[in-house]
Image: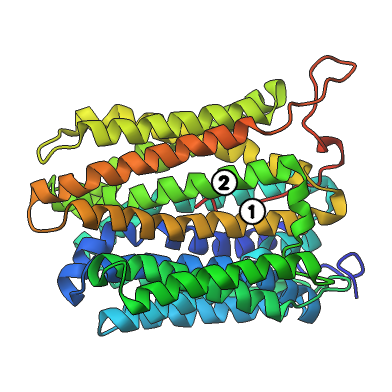
């Protein structure tokens, strides 16, 4: 039975409540943990590599299973798999809250990522099944705003719960939300299936093993050494598996990521920009949130509040970024946003000392936030307009996965640089490591800006305003999460 043939069980409001809550939970979990990391380290122990895995275990499993989760929903039923994903995410959240040690917390975070990877790609299709075509634009906008709110409030909620209750409650928060959504989804969402969905098990195993090997090698290298046998094995095997994934994407009949899509300059450029943007930005946030607490002495709540000019700015600027994109095209807006983000990170690195005031940091945080907003608003449109309409689902999933991969790699790369030049022994040692790491983050995001400049220019139209390539055939799209 196709999505169009399935009767709607509930109204638009119920669909928005259910999918919006799921999106909020997933988006929140990307950043809620950042301000809790110092407290987790103090309570459970572990070094920098353990903190890296608390973040990367979630983003990696989310990234590599995202497209597979969407295919599972198309094949076996979107509502059924949404319920399964939400159940896994909720149970894993409880396991993370109850974790007695750092290793069990990392394992629970990985399972959380599995649940989110199954749950999140299905929110848009489930919402589409419940909302009449003439109301979908409004519904997509509301869902996007809810997801953005989760990103904006992540550091603040994480900091407040950590300071005033316990870091465990950043995970307990998901449990009542999940328990409320599950029966509502069962009763109020209609079941739907995709047409001819394929499951690429070989591709999923290759990309999962490849990314795990590379991230494992990068995380272990600072403590074990780059010539350690396990580090070299992880890096070499991971690279080989990713190369095999590329070959698989070229030769397989129905691969999860067809490599032919990268023949499009537009598709290659916007995905390179997305990967580099998240690599530089997410890795920097990982260290900057710890700097605010461990070096500058802010409480978790104070650190979360001080991050809001960065993480919350897209809520204010994105509508204007959309207007600019409509007027001038997506390429200049995205490139400008990336260069502003790079400038903001460079600014943060330049003013970072053991005693930097918040007033000195604030301009950098605002610049970074504006840059992030200018990137997010047009980037999804550029992704979707770079491929044919029938390939837009694959394109959206690929871009979302690459963003998450960039975040996981960013944490590993920036932490390696930090470890090589600094450490946790003193405030000055932390700054010594922070500076080169964030500078590298700034350079990486600047390279993302260069990649964005390689996007094709918008085509002129009779009205003189022009359109980005493929926009005329573009279907609505919503990123599962901004970060």
Colouring scheme, one of rainbow, by chain, secondary structure, one colour: rainbow
Q: Is residue 222 visible?
A: yes
How dense is the environment of label 1, judged by Cα within 10 Å: few (below 14), some, or many (20 and up)? Answer: many
Please tell me which residue is depicted at 56% across the width and 65% down the height of the picture: 63
Give the vertical position of 140 relative to 251 (above or below): above
Q: Position of residue 410 (x, y in %)?
A: 41, 54
Question: Observer-nearest residue: 132 or 467?
Answer: 467
Residue that appears at 76% across and 62% down: 258
**Closer to us: 415 or 384:** 415
Residue 237 in the image: x percent, y percent? Answer: 50, 75
Residue 166 seen: no
Labels 1 & 2 near each other (Cβ < 8 A): yes
Number of numbered discs on residues: 2
Mark 2 lies on a secondary structure that is: helix
Q: Nearer the viewer, residue 278 or 109?
A: 278
Measured in 3D between alpha carbons, the distance from the residue under mark 1 to the one under mark 2, in whole angstroms, is: 7 Å
Crowd rating for badge 2 (residues with CA inside 10 Å; few <14, some 14–19, many 20+):
many
Instruction: Give left or right: position of 391 versus 348.
Output: right
Secondary element at tag 1: helix
Quadrant of the rendered image containing residue 80? bottom right
Q: Position of residue 33 (x, y in %)?
A: 34, 62
> Which residue is most to the front?
227
Which percent across, then down, holds residue 214? Answer: 46, 68
Quarter of the image where the N terminus is located:
bottom right
Residue 23, compared with residue 275, is above or below; it is below
Q: Which residue is mark 2?
A: 274
Checking the image for residue 399, the label placed there is 1
Q: Earlier in the sequence, mark 1 or mark 2?
A: 2
């Amino acid at each position: 039975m196709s999505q169009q043939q399935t009767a709607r069980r509930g109204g638009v409001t119920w669909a928005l409540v259910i999918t919006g809550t799921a999106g909020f939970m997933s988006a929140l979990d990307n950043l809620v943990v950042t301000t809790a990391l110092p407290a987790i380290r103090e309570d459970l122990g572990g070094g920098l590599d353990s903190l890296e895995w608390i973040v990367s275990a979630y983003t990696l499993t989310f990234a590599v299973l995202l497209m597979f989760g969407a295919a599972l929903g198309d094949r076996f039923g979107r509502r059924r798999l949404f319920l399964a994903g939400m159940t896994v995410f909720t149970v894993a959240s409880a396991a993370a809250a109850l974790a007695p040690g750092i290793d069990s917390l990392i394992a629970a975070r990985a399972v959380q990522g599995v649940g989110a990877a199954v749950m999140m790609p299905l929110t848009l299709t489930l919402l589409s099944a419940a909302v009449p075509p003439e109301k979908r634009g409004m519904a997509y906008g509301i869902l996007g705003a809810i997801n953005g709110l989760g990103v904006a409030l992540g550091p603040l909620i994480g900091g407040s719960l950590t300071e005033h209750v316990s870091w465990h409650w950043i995970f307990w928060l998901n449990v009542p939300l999940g328990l409320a959504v599950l029966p509502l989804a069962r009763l109020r969402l209609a079941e739907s299936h995709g047409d001819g969905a394929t499951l690429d098990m070989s591709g999923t195993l290759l990309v999962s093993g490849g990314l795990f090997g590379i991230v494992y090698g990068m995380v272990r290298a600072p403590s074990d050494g780059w010539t350690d046998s396990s580090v070299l094995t992880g890096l070499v095997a991971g690279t080989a598996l990713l190369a095999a994934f590329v070959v698989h994407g070229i030769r397989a009949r129905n691969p999860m990521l067809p490599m032919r899509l990268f023949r499009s300059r537009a598709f290659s450029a916007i995905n390179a920009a997305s990967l580099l943007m998240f690599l530089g930005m997410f890795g920097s946030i990982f260290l900057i949130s710890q700097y605010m607490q461990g070096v500058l002495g802010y409480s978790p709540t104070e650190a979360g509040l001080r991050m809001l000019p960065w993480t919350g700015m897209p809520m204010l600027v994105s509508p204007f970024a959309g207007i600019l994109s409509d007027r001038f095209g997506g390429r200049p807006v995205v490139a400008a946003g990336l260069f502003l983000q790079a400038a903001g990170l460079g600014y943060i690195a330049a003013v970072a000392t053991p005693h930097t005031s918040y007033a000195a940091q604030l301009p950098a945080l605002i610049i970074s936030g504006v840059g992030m907003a200018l990137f997010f608003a047009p980037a999804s449109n550029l992704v979707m307009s770079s491929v044919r309409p029938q390939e837009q689902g694959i394109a959206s999933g690929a871009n979302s996965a690459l963003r998450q991969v960039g975040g996981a790699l960013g944490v590993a790369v920036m932490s390696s640089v930090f470890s090589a030049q600094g450490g946790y022994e003193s405030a000055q040692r932390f700054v010594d490591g922070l500076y080169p790491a964030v500078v590298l983050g700034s350079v990486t995001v600047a390279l993302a800006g260069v990649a964005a400049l390689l996007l094709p220019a918008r085509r002129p139209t009779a009205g003189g305003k022009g359109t980005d390539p493929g926009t005329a055939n573009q279907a609505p799209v919503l990123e599962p999460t901004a970060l």
